[in-house]
């Protein structure tokens, strides 16, 4: 499934985020899957999704450097795949 | 370490590995086991907690609720409830509802004694609850030799009740022994036939297992067979318990590390907190949830748990080329067989454990915490009576 950076996303309401020194642990109470956000900046991106009209804007707001956008987009795609975030 | 549903997504971040971060510990456990009672209708010969009799100091309903409140605050997303037989607690169903209502999902292990049709329908209607039925033989003779007469039929009745109630995918949990390792395919068939997920875990020499381990643990040839079987079936859950087999080839799916005190922890029925479910021994007791600061303080400040999060010395295994694969194996397995913690696992696939075991003076082996076994040495079966009373 292609991930569209220009779309608006949100943190799935069934997901809880637990901050950890390495980033965060996220748990989806619906599908009972545990995922790991391996950097504090990725946690920031995920938390900012709700407040921005596109995932690209959230990446900018979190200060993701241009050279790392592809990696962050891949991480968001994976989180969308496990229903941690979804399009709104 | 049982992170059955972990998705290790490769996300950007500093170069340190996720496993490395886990070794230094987390703000709360990922995999918390909570044994609600030492009471049990069975007397399995390998019981990790030497269960049987209820302990009069057992946490009250209010104290259990306070622990759940704490877990909610710590964002422990789910708890693995066991025992003993947890459903023997009269307040079991209320605690289950309380936990779910407080955003702490529940996976509970049961021998099926109270899992009749009515209970199965109730469970089918509750979100965030997972059920795990224990079974240690694909046939009654193999199962009942370990778990007690009639326990196979009891477990099968419970499975049928869950299937009929439309519960969905429950788990069937097997402890691999010398006698059931040849039945792995049959276990898989049983699970597939009732829409369940198979989970196989390692036999530990803990609790009553200290006395039965030598006769029950798989042979070296059987370990190889088990490794190959698991490698070909990534859908079978293992609770990450076979990482000592990773020295046989490619690592099995999972974190492949000893999670004790790092991501794993145990609360026992009287509130004592141990580093993992397999080390119910004073030496691995962090404290009690009844102390000021409760579980949170123990998890974050206990000297024992902090020590377990420090890098472990490879000791006698340092010169072994496979140390990175097996990490020296299971701390509890070493401890209760009398082996040094910085040496090989008793079931080291390279045979180092076997040689080390030959040097251990048996009377010097540590014993498990005061057990709750009933006095009878034979497995006692009370399930029939209890099952009748429950319907």
Image: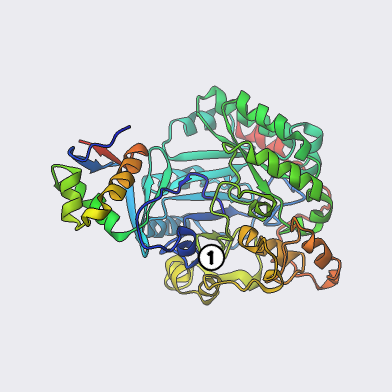
x, y percentage for residue B273?
Answer: 55, 65
Q: Residue furthest bottom?
A: B303
- Total residue callouts: 1
Q: Quadrant of the C terminus of chain B?
A: top right
Q: Residue at x 78, y 36 (%)?
A: B182
* Name of the residue lying farthest toward the front: A67
Give the side of residue A5 with respect to residue B26, left or right: left
- Observer-nearest of B211 and B349: B349
Bin the neighbour count of mark 1 within 10 Å (Cα to Cα): few under 14, some 14-19, many 20 and up: many
Tag 1, which chain?
A: B
Towards the viewer: A87 or B390: A87
Which quadrant would the N terminus of chain B be assigned to in this image?
bottom right
Q: Which SS class for mark 1?
A: loop
Q: Is residue B350 visible?
A: yes
Provide residue B236's location: percent of width, then percent of height.
60, 38
Q: Is residue B28 left or right of residue A72?
A: right
Above or below B377: residue B165: above
Q: Is residue B208 visible?
A: no
Colouring method of the image: rainbow
- The residue singled out by tag 1 in the image is B261
Place of residue B268 in the rendered image (x, y in percent of width and height, measured from the top left): 58, 60
Q: Quadrant of residue B33?
A: bottom right
Q: Is residue B205 above or below residue B198?
A: below
Residue A32: x and y, percent?
Answer: 43, 41
């Amino acid at each position: 499934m292609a991930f569209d950076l220009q779309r608006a996303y949100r943190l799935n309401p069934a997901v809880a985020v637990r901050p950890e020194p390495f980033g965060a642990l996220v748990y989806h109470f619906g599908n009972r899957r545990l995922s790991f956000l391996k950097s504090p900046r990725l946690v920031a991106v995920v938390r900012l999704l709700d407040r921005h009209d596109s995932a690209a804007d959230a990446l900018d707001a979190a200060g993701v450097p241009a050279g790392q956008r592809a990696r962050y987009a891949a991480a968001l795609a994976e989180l969308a795949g496990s229903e941690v975030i979804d399009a709104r | 370490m049982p992170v059955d549903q972990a998705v290790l997504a490769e996300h950007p971040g500093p170069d340190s590995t996720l496993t490395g971060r886990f070794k230094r510990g987390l703000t709360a456990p990922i995999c918390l086991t909570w044994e609600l009672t030492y009471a049990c209708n069975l007397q399995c010969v390998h019981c990790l907690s030497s269960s049987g009799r209820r302990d009069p100091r057992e946490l009250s309903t209010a104290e259990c609720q306070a622990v759940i409140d704490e877990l909610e605050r710590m964002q422990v997303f789910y708890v693995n409830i066991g025992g003993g037989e947890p459903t023997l607690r009269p307040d079991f169903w209320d605690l289950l509802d309380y936990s779910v209502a407080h955003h702490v999902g529940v996976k509970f292990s049961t021998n099926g004694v109270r899992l009749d049709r009515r209970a199965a329908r109730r469970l089918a209607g509750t979100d965030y609850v997972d059920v795990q039925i224990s079974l240690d033989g694909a046939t009654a003779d193999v199962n009942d030799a370990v778990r007690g007469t009639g326990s196979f039929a009891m477990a099968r009745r419970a499975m049928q009740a869950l299937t009929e109630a439309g519960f969905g995918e429950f788990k069937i949990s097997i402890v691999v022994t010398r006698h059931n390792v040849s039945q792995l395919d049959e276990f898989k068939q049983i699970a597939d036939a009732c829409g369940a997920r198979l989970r196989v875990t390692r036999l530990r020499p803990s609790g009553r297992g200290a006395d039965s381990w030598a006769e029950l643990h798989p042979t070296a040839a059987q370990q190889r067979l088990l490794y190959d079987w698991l490698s070909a079936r990534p859908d079978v859950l293992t609770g990450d318990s076979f990482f000592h087999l990773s020295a046989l080839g490619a690592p099995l799916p999972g974190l492949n590390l000893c999670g004790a005190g790092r991501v794993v922890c145990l609360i026992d029925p009287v509130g004592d907190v141990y580093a993992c479910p397999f080390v119910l021994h004073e030496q691995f007791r962090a404290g009690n949830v009844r102390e000021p600061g409760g579980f949170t303080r123990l998890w974050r400040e206990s000297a024992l748990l902090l020590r377990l999060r420090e890098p472990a010395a490879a000791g006698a295994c340092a010169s072994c080329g496979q140390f990175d694969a097996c990490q020296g194996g299971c701390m509890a397995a070493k401890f209760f067989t009398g082996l040094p913690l910085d040496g090989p696992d008793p079931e080291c696939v390279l045979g180092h454990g076997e040689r080390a075991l030959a040097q251990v003076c048996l009377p010097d082996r540590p014993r498990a915490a005061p057990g709750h076994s009933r006095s009878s040495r034979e497995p006692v079966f009370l399930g029939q009576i209890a099952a009748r009373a429950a319907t």
